[in-house]
Amino acid sequence: MTRHELPAGMVRAPDRTGTHDGYMPGFGNDFETEALPGALPQGMNSPQKCEYGLYGEQLSGTAFTAPSHQNERTWCYRIRPSVKHTHRFRKIALPYWKSAPLVDPDIVSLGQYRWNPVPHSEGLTWLTGMRTMTTAGDVNTQVGMAAHIYLVTDSMVDAYFYSADSELLIVPQEGRLRFCTELGVIDLAPQEIAVIPRGLVYRVEVLDGPARGFVCENYGQKFQLPGRGPIGANCMANRRDFKTPVAAFEDRETPSTVTVKWGGHFHETHIGHSPLDVVAWHGNYAPVKYDLTTYCPVGAILFDHPDPSIFTVLTAPSGVEGTANIDFVLFRERWLVAEDTFRPPWYHKNVMSELMGNIYGQYDAKPQGFVPGGMSLHNMMLPHGPDREAFEKASNAELAPHKLDNTMSFMFETRFPQHLTPFAATEAPLQDDYIDCWSDLEKKFDGTPGKK
Ligand SMILES: O=C(O)Cc1cc(O)ccc1O
Ligand SMILES: [Fe+2]
């Protein structure tokens, strides 16, 4: 992948070992990084005076008193304290970016739904190009999520954003984006994901456009790695494959805007400089990216089709043990080897709500119609499963080992019902005939024993 030049004037921590390539490996590590030598205080957080005349500031991602194994915070040493990066706010409208609760009495969310890719349009930034498809839970009580599609053609120029409501899990499908954050720069391409923590200020630039992808906006507890149980210490998503950017800052005095999502509403403030002014930081509350092709799937090696939870990349707990606020689940290339087994997903009805997106290729339960950039929704307790074509093929296939190749789809699975937004119900390219994919499933039963 080509390495893009940093934005003009941005200073990044030097690569002293020749290995970091702009990122530090590990999930939830306690990192430390400085873009100028000696900027990071050693052995303490709050010296009477910081080096270079910097201000020390803590960004808390969990309550001060959260148990120490969950406690997340980062110490920033910056040109100005964040309080100088916000001024009087006024509410602004971003009409396509919605928050829960949003239950429109005229919209029927009970149904199996599928959408074609939402087409690109001109002049859209990360903020104006966000299109909410579903919302679940309640942003004010910090439970649930929203699923969005982003369509981005234009970089944010002298414009910055943070969400106080949520962390954002970003799943690109087309194009490349750059996230210039307070804690460093993340370049993101399809087959990668990023998690931008709640409260972190950033701007989004287009490296290769137009860009389209999916966002899971998590109102609840942070995403973490799932427990592997008897699988042990390896496989699935491995900690070292997560990458956090090294410190990078800019000292730029230009009229700029900061937009804040707070309580489901957007607020704008005007300042005279870039807020990306963190010269050095240490801590474990930081943005991260992950290459999905490093996900090591584990599955059935003799018979039967396990629950899709075996493919969980990240999980955001809900407080009820084993019942996630959100699971992020990845269906990628893998071998199918199970004997005497119907290999695709079984027919099922799930207490959790399943929103799926296709990053590339073909999904085994839906050979047609679920296309890259497209989405589907099988809501809480709504039956679904393979379409007729997939069922007939898999029921009659010769069960030699078979590689599912050229396939990468994912699921945002939440314990809460997902409600369609007006955009999803009326403006997005909904496939009206989706449920017909099951209409030709035959009755095969005729009371004859031994019939298979
Ligand atoms: O519905 C789907 O396609 C997702 C899914 C996949 C699978 O392998 C098992 C259950 C499940 O919900
Ligand atoms: Fe399902």
Image (tube, rainbow, N blue to C red):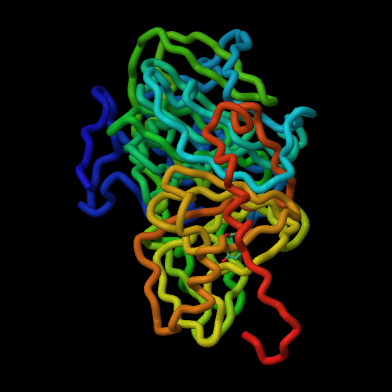
Find residue 308 and report its horizontal and vertical position in percent: 59, 66
Q: Quadrant of the C terminus?
A: bottom right
Q: Is residue 233 visible?
A: no
Q: Look at 65% across and 48% down and name the residue there.
A: 112
Q: Look at 72% across and 90% down and name the residue there.
A: 449
Eyeballing the image, is 60 above or below 127? Answer: below
Asked which quadrant contains residue 178, the reply is top left
Q: In screen coordinates, is 111 left or right of 374? A: right
Q: Is residue 333 visible?
A: yes
Q: In screen coordinates, is 158 left or right of 6? A: right
Eyeballing the image, is 445 above or below 224? Answer: below
Find residue 132 and report its horizontal and vertical position in percent: 58, 31
Disc count in the image?
Answer: 0
Which sits in the foreground, 451 or 399? Answer: 451
Asked which quadrant contains residue 250, the reply is top left
Q: Look at 41% across and 70% down and name the residue there.
A: 334
Which sits in the foreground, 408 or 289? Answer: 408
Eyeballing the image, is 157 above or below 320? Answer: above
Find residue 253 and report its horizontal and vertical position in percent: 35, 11
Which sits in the foreground, 179 or 405? Answer: 405
The quadrant of the picture showing ligand 2 is bottom right
Find residue 273 and report its horizontal and vertical position in percent: 40, 13
Which sits in the foreground, 118 or 296? Answer: 118
Asked which quadrant contains residue 382, the reply is bottom right
Q: In screen coordinates, is 342 left or right of 153? A: right
Query: Of all residues shown, which one is farthest toward the bottom?
Result: 450
